[in-house]
Amino acid sequence: MSSDIRFLGLVLFACS
């Protein structure tokens, strides 16, 4: 599950 959270964080960072 932590992997999904890190992936989502990376996507949000890219979106910023």
Image (spheres, grey):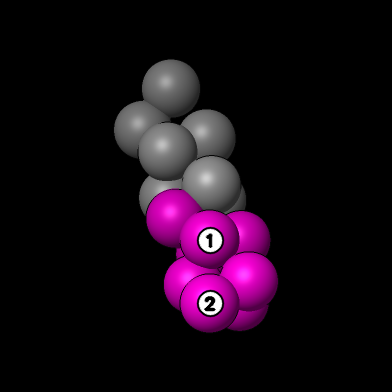
- According to the picture, the residue beneath numbered tag 1 turns out to be 12
Of residues 14 and 1, which is closer to you in this image? 14
Q: Are marks 2 and 1 in contact (CB under 8 Å)?
A: yes
Image position, residue 8 (x, y; %):
53, 47
Task: Identify the image quadrant of the N terminus.
Answer: top left
Residue 5 visible in image:
yes
Q: Secondary structure at mark 1?
A: helix
* 13 is higher (above) or lower (below) than 1: below
Task: Identify the disc placed on residue 16.
Answer: 2
Residue 15 included in the magenta stretch of the image: yes
Q: Which residues are magenta?
A: 9-16
Above or below for 16 versus 5: below
> The residue under label 1 is which amino acid type?
Leu
For the point 44% across and 55% down, the residue is 9
Expressed as whole percent of the image width and height from the top left, the position of residue 3 reads: 46, 39
Residue at the farthest left position: 2
At horizontal 52% and vertical 35% (from top left) the residue drawn is: 4
Q: Main secondary structure of the magenta part?
A: helix
| Label 1 environment density (alpha carbons within 10 Å; few <14, some 14–19, many ≥20) | few
- What is the count of numbered marks? 2
1 or 10, which lies in front? 10
Which residue is rendered at x = 53% and y = 77% of the image? 16
